[in-house]
Amino acid sequence: MLNYSTSEENYIKAIFHLQQADGTVTTNELAAELKTKPASVTDMMKKLKTKKLVHYEAYHGFRLTNDGRKLALIIIRRHRLWEFFLAEKLKFSWEEVHAVAEHLEHVSSKKLIDKLDEFLGFPRFDPHGDPIPDANGKIETSKQVCLQDLPLNKTATVSHVSDQSSEMLELLGHKKIGIGTRLEVKRKFNFDNSLEIKIRQSKRTPSEQAPINVSEQLSKNIFAKYDE
Amino acid sequence: MLNYSTSEENYIKAIFHLQQADGTVTTNELAAELKTKPASVTDMMKKLKTKKLVHYEAYHGFRLTNDGRKLALIIIRRHRLWEFFLAEKLKFSWEEVHAVAEHLEHVSSKKLIDKLDEFLGFPRFDPHGDPIPDANGKIETSKQVCLQDLPLNKTATVSHVSDQSSEMLELLGHKKIGIGTRLEVKRKFNFDNSLEIKIRQSKRTPSEQAPINVSEQLSKNIFAKYDE
DNA sequence: AAAATATTTTAGGTTTGCCTAAAAATATTT
DNA sequence: AAATATTTTTAGGCAAACCTAAAATATTTT
């Protein structure tokens, strides 16, 4: 397998994430995501096209080829395994792991990553609740749904939080919501799209929980998966 | 603390190692060590001089400043801790750790390295027997001596092997010599400078060991420290 | 559908780190 | 100490990855 620069890898990863939502990705979107300028994106897209990692026609956006997708999954696998390592073994906090993993993910030894995976006991989710692709690039797909989209009275488990500002974490901490929290949406108020949710303690609950109110802004940043 | 490029870090590390032996380092030496061209070395020396990491006057070689030395020790610390991690936790073999650590050493989070150090139990030597600088840059100095220079009948512990070609490792394996082996030089033959050594089993030895012959070439690549 | 606006690409420039070839400085021989 | 050889530096270029400003294309509004 060929070797790619840190920059190329960052582009591939960003396109992967953006096209989850969009289908095809635009120059401006990608420039914003990578905090770079549109002209730089165009430069790189030409390069990635000659390397057959993206489909790209001038003025018509781009999406990953099969090879591009494979590469993205390799990088995401590295990133999430390092995040797991940092949190689990080195006791980094949830918020700290991402920045360090951004650097570690570009060390490209396959053997390193596979041995790390084994050392960690083949974890299936990173500390943010995102699934870790396996050595063949297979990734758990059970789709996450934003709290806004959960049907009423269906219990689900919080699996992802997009915004990770300290303000957000403060609020989540206060409401006692985190990755793995099981909850149900009880009511939805159309006036401001706020939700009333109930947290389901995993162990038997000593006292019944009071319902919690979640604003639209907050709910849009919390994702959950349906329980089986 | 400032941030340095991978290239700058590699130069600093190489100068550190070369000046252990030489005192001051020359352009050609460094170019050979880094597999680059003398002209590139001159370019970089100018840059490192403006960053106050090396003392450098055109045509007169260079050596690290205090800041350069500090930086070198940080990089060596990273490198050796990762080597220890790879060997001890991920079960990489002795020969494999170096190449991977060459990449990991450039991830520059101080917190990462200090937490890794703690996770590993503050190891004092890497898998090659080289000492690991502590978080303050202190490094064990108890000087290593090449087998040729060991006095007769003084037991010492093998602490370093310079050449790590597969041929060398094959020979060492055969003679059952490795890092940590305790031994004594019994005789020295002036004709070809070969040595007759005796290996001291650490546990009680079932049968007395036969003395082993070591050629001059081999002995020059094996370093040991006197036992206390 | 033409005009106005927004997006994307091109053209040309910068920095980093490398290169080759030629010039300058130093070291070694004779 | 002059001639020769070696080492080091300078000069000028190249590729990667970024940038700004201007031109080309697409989209939206009127």
Image: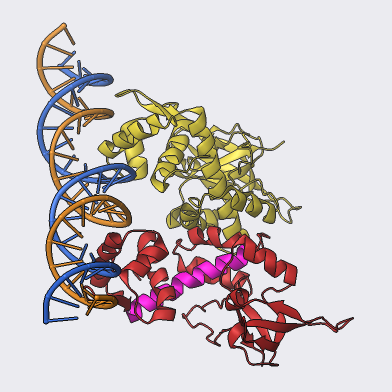
Chain colours: A yellow, B red, C orange, D blue
> Which of B135/B82 is in front?
B82
Say above or below: B195 vs B170.
below
State left or right for residue B32 relative to residue D10.
Answer: right
* Res A186 seen here: yes
Q: Quadrant of residue B93?
A: bottom right
Q: Residue at left 44%, top 43%?
A: A4
Magenta part of the chain:
B64-86
State left or right for residue B228 relative to residue A18.
Answer: right
> Which of B185/B158 is in front?
B185
Residue B146, horizontal then vertical, whole percent: 58, 82
Say above or below: B149 vs B58.
below
Magenta-span inclusion, residue B79: yes
Say above or below: B159 vs B97.
below
> Which of B30/B73 is in front?
B30
Residue B107, horizontal then vertical, whole percent: 46, 61
Q: Please tell me whether the stretch drawn in magenta is mainly helix, strand or loop.
A: helix
Residue B57, horizontal then vertical, whole percent: 22, 76
Q: Residue at left 42%, top 32%?
A: A51
Residue A217, horizontal then vertical, whole percent: 44, 42
Magenta-span inclusion, residue B35: no
Q: Quadrant of the N terminus of chain B?
A: bottom left
